[in-house]
Image (cartoon, rainbow, N blue to C red):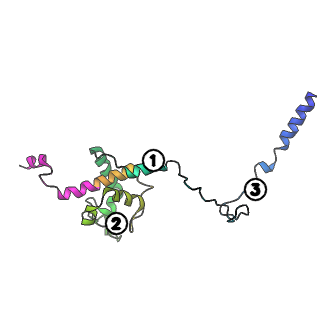
Amino acid sequence: MRRAATIAALALLLAGCDVSMTQQRKYTTYAPARLWSDGTSARPLPAGVVAQGDGARFAAAQTPPPVSAALLARGRERFDAFCSPCHGLAGDGDGVVVAHGFPRPPSYHIDRLLAAPAQHFYDVITRGYGVMYSYADRVDPHDRWAIAAYIRALQLSRRATVAQAPETGRALQ
């Protein structure tokens, strides 16, 4: 009896091991499907769905870090690597690619960009603007804030007065 049960169990086990286990019927990408009323195999996302990590990314995009010397140093490093080829080292829009025929980007020192909040620069790096494409896949969110802080420092450096930096005034006397 025990032997018969063992043979029956092995027979059932082996009966389940055929090609259909590895070659199953399925819908391929964009294949028509009669199962759904709209006839497509691509299903829309349910209402209210949030991708994993989107909450943290959204919070990082809305909350700039506190400005520090380390943040500005990182911003300068990232600006020099990603932004200066077009915008130039001083942010005047005279980068090396402009000399090779690319469109001239606006200077960071024009009134419109002087009045723009730091969030504007973060958003432009993230989504692109005009002929500038998105750098979201190249520049991390923290580095985007660092670049925005460095751009603001470039803007302030052009308009700084001795009253705003009294220790500099003493050094110049």
Q: What separation in Å lies between label 1 and label 2 (alpha carbons)?
A: 35 Å
Asked if the residue at tag 3 contacts the one at tag 2, i.e. Cβ–Cβ closer than 8 Å, the answer is no
Q: Residues within 10 Å of mark 2 (few under 14, many from 20)?
A: some
User: In the figure, residue 116 lies in which quadrant?
Assistant: bottom left
**Observer able to see residue 63:** yes
Residue 56 marker: 1
Above-or-below relation of 144 to 9: below
The residue positioned farthest toward the top in the image shown: 2
Q: Secondary structure at mark 2?
A: helix
Q: Residues within 10 Å of mark 3 (few under 14, many from 20)?
A: few
Residue 97 marker: 2
Between discs 1 and 2, the one toward the N terminus:
1
Which label sits in the foreground, 1 or 3? Answer: 1
Q: State the residue position of label 3.
A: 25
The residue positioned farthest toward the left in the image shown: 173
Between discs 2 and 3, the one toward the N terminus:
3
Kind of residue sitting beneath label 3:
Arg
Q: Which residues are magenta?
A: 151-173
Which quadrant, please, contains the N terminus? Answer: top right
- Where residue 112 appears, as percent x and y from the top left, is 27, 66
Query: Is residue 35 shown in magenta?
Result: no
Q: Nearer the viewer, residue 130 or 34?
A: 34
